[in-house]
Amino acid sequence: MQNYDFVHSCIRVMDLEKSIEFYKEALNLKESSRKDFPENKFTLVYLTDQNESFELELTYNYDREEPYTIGNGYSHIAVVVDDLEKSYQRHKDAGYQVGELKSLSENSSGYYFITDPDGYRTEIIAR
């Protein structure tokens, strides 16, 4: 069996700067990276603790006008794996609900999502 390492958890936020300030102040997290996708109208900010082994991803969608409710504000957790295609095939063969293999660009890692029985998604990313 392959080893999976947890790498980040994602939440969607209405006010990016206010959320960053909260996590910095309340939980002593620091911004480790930021990725802006203006063509897709969203920004990702990654916050990490002192161990830097796991990150909280804040997703800011530009056009959101109403606050998220508990349930649809949660997005996913993520793990990395050495052999993405092998993992993908194993999950499909097991009958799990899996999405397509994708990447955000030619230079980014491949990934797919697997959905648990309750509908929560985990992103599986190529290491």
Image (cartoon, rainbow, N blue to C red):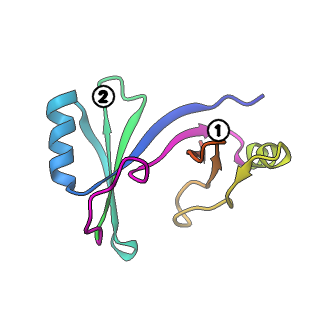
Q: Which residue is mark 2?
A: 49
In this picture, which residue range is highlighted in magenta? 63-84
Taking depth in this image into account, of 107 and 112 the one nearest to the observer is 112
Q: Are marks 2 and 1 in contact (CB under 8 Å)?
A: no
The x, y position of residue 118, in whole percent, is 60, 43
Taking depth in this image into account, of 40 and 115 the one nearest to the observer is 115
Q: Earlier in the sequence, mark 2 or mark 1?
A: 2
Q: Residue at x 48, y 36 (%)?
A: 7
Q: Is residue 126 left or right of residue 89?
A: left
Helix, strand or loop under label 2: loop
Helix, strand or loop under label 1: strand
Taking depth in this image into account, of 47 and 122 the one nearest to the observer is 122
Disc number placed over residue 81 in the picture, else none: 1
The x, y position of residue 114, in whole percent, is 65, 48
Kind of residue at badge 1:
Val
Disc number placed over residue 40 in the picture, else none: none
Residue 96 shown in magenta: no
Q: Quadrant of residue 124?
A: top right
Q: What is the count of numbered marks?
A: 2
Q: Is residue 89 visible?
A: yes
- The quarter of the image holding the C terminus is top right
